[in-house]
Image (cartoon, helix red, strand yellow):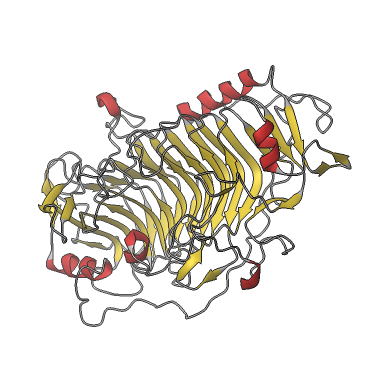
């Protein structure tokens, strides 16, 4: 069957083709014995104009960003429509370690721990910027946990507003080899997109060893984004999607050996406005004809049982979600989980749950989409987000729940009764689907759009334990992290087959090669 290409891919591919006619090519470093005009990526970025290309030769670039800028980044991009491309994904490294240190060194003495933290490559409120075919590593948080993002399209973090349009990431790696165990400094987010209206696409990417999440797309009520062919490992969360929704597709990707796999949730925080809601804007039918535009399909979510990740236990959703969890919809609405393989997660395969958010929110967050159970200015204010309208359908489960805590298994549901409720159809497990409540593919849970809910005592107790909102039932066991553990560079990742594809003719790419249009 021919797959319909998401609109984000088509829009960006057409924009790329149209932008090359009058663009300049700025070259950094050395490629095939030919020296470029610039010795640093930031110098080329500062000299670039909208639509220009920046090609980067192999090397370990200890970038220092823009002195005095509000964004503490190794490479800070504030010019729209730039194309930043490495000539080899594994050998072009934007490196947060000290000058003179080995590439992505794991030695404590080689790390840069800035007072306010540092980020790697940051695109700040500049639409249409492409980052391709390179690696970013070891940009760490401050000792208080600030910053620490490796590759970040930032449309206005913490503003509660959309401040950026389209973006593109292709053949990119984000990782770190250093942490102090579960405590900062560590690398916090790998590939990060916030406060953007899109269209956006990350294709052929890898992220690992993050204290919060390997991937993040959030703070966008209608994200217009696609994450495909992604691989997330050895992080607190494989993916985080706080207050995201609308047109958002995560497909053909793998999330494994994290503390927990992908999580999409509502929170009353600086990722305002809440909630997470995957309903199609304007009552559109969506790709599946059911009004849902946030779709998780054809992914492999497995073996997320790793306690030895940075940030494990250090507050927030990443710290609270228990080891051994596959996919979490926390206070999320209208998400389709379709045709995924979900296996070997030792707590739960899929969790669909209401989320009581007890954090102290910033002024921009007002519990939109939730219900205040305890109102501000009370110090213990509580914003309660309901999970409803989610569809879990046609997924293949196996070998989940081997910790054997109460309710551990393929699926657990905790949600107040609402219309529409959450529905579960066509899911399989070769040993029989395990769930709480039992027989979750029977009435009233097998009819999408119908009213239902489940607040069983067993699910209440175990989820309260898991989220650190209550005491744990007797016999509950979760593995604890080691006092120290080592992080490693990932295996070499597939590099772009032809880094000259689509680039205007220049000394490094003397023969123009047309970029294949998405189809």
Q: Residue at x 34, y 75 (%)?
A: 403
Residue 491 image point, x, y percent: 66, 60
Q: Quadrant of residue 481?
A: bottom left
Residue, x 68% and y 56% (percent of image)?
492
Horizontal side of 22 relative to 209 (left or right) equals right
Residue extending furthest toward the right? 33
Report the residue at 61% width, 65% height from top: 111
Across and down, in percent, residue 360 comes to 24, 56
Q: Is residue 173 above or below residue 48?
A: below
- Asked if one can make out residue 488 in the rendered structure from this viewpoint, the answer is yes
Relative image position of residue 252 (x, y in whole percent) = 49, 45
Quarter residue 57 falls in: top right
- State left or right for residue 221 relative to residue 166: left
Residue 352 placed where, x, y %?
Answer: 26, 54
Q: Residue at x 80, y 35 (%)?
A: 37
| Position above or below: 338 against 201 | below
- In front of the other: 62 or 287: 62
Q: Is residue 230 left or right of residue 337?
A: right
175 w.r.t. 501: above or below: below
In depth, the one of 458 and 44 nearer the eye is 44
Q: Residue furthest front?
A: 68
């Amino acid at each position: 069957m021919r797959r319909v290409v998401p609109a984000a891919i088509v829009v960006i591919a057409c924009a790329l083709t149209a932008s090359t006619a009058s663009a300049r090519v700025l070259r950094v470093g050395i490629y095939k014995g030919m020296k470029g005009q610039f010795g640093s990526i930031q110098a080329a970025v500062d000299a670039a104009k909208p639509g220009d290309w920046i090609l980067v030769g192999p090397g370990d670039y200890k970038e220092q960003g823009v002195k005095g800028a509000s964004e503490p980044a190794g490479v800070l991009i504030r010019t729209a429509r730039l194309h930043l491309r490495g000539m080899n994904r594994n050998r072009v490294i934007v490196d947060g370690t000290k000058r003179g240190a080995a590439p992505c060194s794991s030695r404590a003495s080689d790390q840069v721990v800035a007072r306010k933290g540092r980020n790697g490559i940051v695109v700040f409120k500049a639409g249409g910027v492409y980052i391709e075919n390179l690696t970013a590593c070891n940009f760490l948080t401050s000792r208080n946990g600030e910053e620490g993002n490796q590759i970040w399209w930032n449309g206005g973090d913490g503003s509660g507003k959309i401040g950026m349009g389209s973006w593109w990431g292709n053949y990119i790696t984000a990782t770190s080899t250093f942490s102090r165990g579960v405590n900062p400094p560590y690398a916090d987010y790998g590939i990060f997109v916030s406060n953007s209206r899109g269209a956006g696409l990350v294709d052929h990417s890898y992220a690992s060893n993050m204290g919060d999440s390997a991937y993040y797309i959030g703070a966008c009520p209608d994200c217009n984004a696609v994450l495909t062919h992604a691989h997330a490992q050895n992080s607190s969360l494989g993916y985080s999607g706080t207050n995201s929704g609308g047109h958002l597709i995560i497909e053909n990707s793998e999330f494994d050996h994290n503390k927990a796999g992908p999580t999409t949730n509502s929170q009353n925080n600086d990722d305002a406005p809440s909630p997470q809601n995957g309903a199609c804007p304007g009552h559109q039918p969506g790709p599946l004809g059911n009004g849902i535009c946030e779709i998780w399909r054809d992914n492999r979510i497995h073996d997320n049982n790793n306690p030895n990740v940075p940030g494990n236990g250090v507050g927030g959703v990443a710290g609270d979600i228990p080891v051994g969890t596959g996919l979490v919809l926390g206070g999320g609405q209208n998400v389709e989980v379709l045709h995924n393989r979900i296996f070997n997660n030792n707590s739960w395969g899929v969790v669909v749950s209401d989320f009581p958010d007890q954090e102290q929110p910033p002024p921009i967050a007002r519990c939109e989409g939730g219900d205040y159970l305890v109102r501000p200015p009370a110090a213990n204010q509580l914003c309660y987000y309901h999970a409803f309208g989610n569809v879990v359908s046609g997924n293949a489960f196996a070998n989940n729940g081997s910790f054997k805590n109460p309710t551990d298994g393929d699926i657990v549901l905790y949600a107040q009764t609402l219309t529409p409720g959450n529905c579960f159809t066509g899911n399989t497990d070769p040993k029989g689907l395990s769930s709480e409540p039992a027989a979750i593919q029977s009435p009233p849970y097998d009819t999408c759009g119908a009213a239902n809910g489940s607040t069983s005592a067993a699910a209440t107790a175990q989820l309260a334990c898991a989220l650190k909102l209550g005491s744990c039932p007797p016999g509950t066991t979760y593995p604890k992290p080691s006092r120290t553990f080592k992080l490693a560079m990932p295996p070499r990742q597939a590099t772009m087959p032809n880094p000259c594809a689509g680039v205007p003719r220049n000394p490094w790419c003397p023969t123009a090669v047309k970029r294949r249009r998405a189809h």
